[in-house]
Image (spheres, helix red, strand yellow):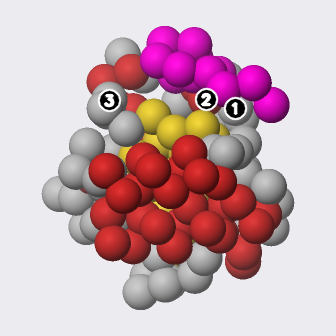
Amino acid sequence: MEQKKGNELVQDMLVQNIWAVVGASANTQKFGYKVFKRLANEGYTVYPVNPNCKEIEGTKCYGSLRDLPEVPGAVSVIVPPSAGIGVLEEAAELGIKRLWFQPGAESAEVIEKADELGLQIVYDRCVLTELG
């Protein structure tokens, strides 16, 4: 898979129909809720991933990417950078190539690990903003 960067990668991700939101939250004030809800409202199939949450407004929450009923085309990551490394490793094992780290979820270590694993990540932009 060729490495896409910047706008090309953003567009490539936004055309994926199936998303997972790692760090999804039932708390309407948190970005984990806002991103999940916005993607769902835009017509995407969205799987919330949070081991500490049973469901978000009637949608079943999954404990990890491994537990999802299908492999998402893109993953929004809204967890601290320390947890992001594990998300990258799990994504790589499952063949998930595109991850979007919301502002604050990325770190130099996360970016380096994504490169090492051959994953494509967006990390300096907000998915809510890019959806317009």
Q: Earlier in the sequence, mark 2 or mark 3?
A: 2
Tell me, for residue 117, which label it has, or none: none
Tell me, for residue 16, which label it has, or none: 1
* Residue that appears at 51% across and 39% down: 121
* Residue that appears at 60% across and 38% down: 120
| C-alpha distance separating marks 2 and 3 | 12 Å
Quarter of the image that includes the N terminus = top right
Q: Do the residues under discs 2 and 3 have CB atoms within 8 angstroms?
A: no
| C-alpha distance separating marks 1 and 2 | 5 Å
Amino acid type for the residue under numbered disc 1? Gln
For label 2, the residue is 13
| C-alpha distance separating marks 1 and 3 | 17 Å
Amino acid type for the residue under numbered disc 3? Arg
Q: Do the residues under discs 1 and 3 have CB atoms within 8 angstroms?
A: no
Q: Position of residue 111 (x, y in %)?
A: 42, 47
Label 2 residue SS: helix
Label 3 residue SS: loop
Q: Is residue 128 depicted above or below 5 in this figure?
A: below
For label 3, the residue is 125
The answer to whether one can see residue 83 in this image is yes
Amino acid type for the residue under numbered disc 2? Met
Would you say 117 lies left or right of 124 here? right
The answer to whether one can see residue 75 in this image is no
Q: Do the residues under discs 1 and 2 have CB atoms within 8 angstroms?
A: yes
Q: Position of residue 73 (x, y in %)?
A: 72, 42
Q: Earlier in the sequence, mark 1 or mark 3?
A: 1
Would you say 25 lies left or right of 10 here? left
Q: Is residue 74 magenta?
A: no
Range drawn in magenta: 1-12
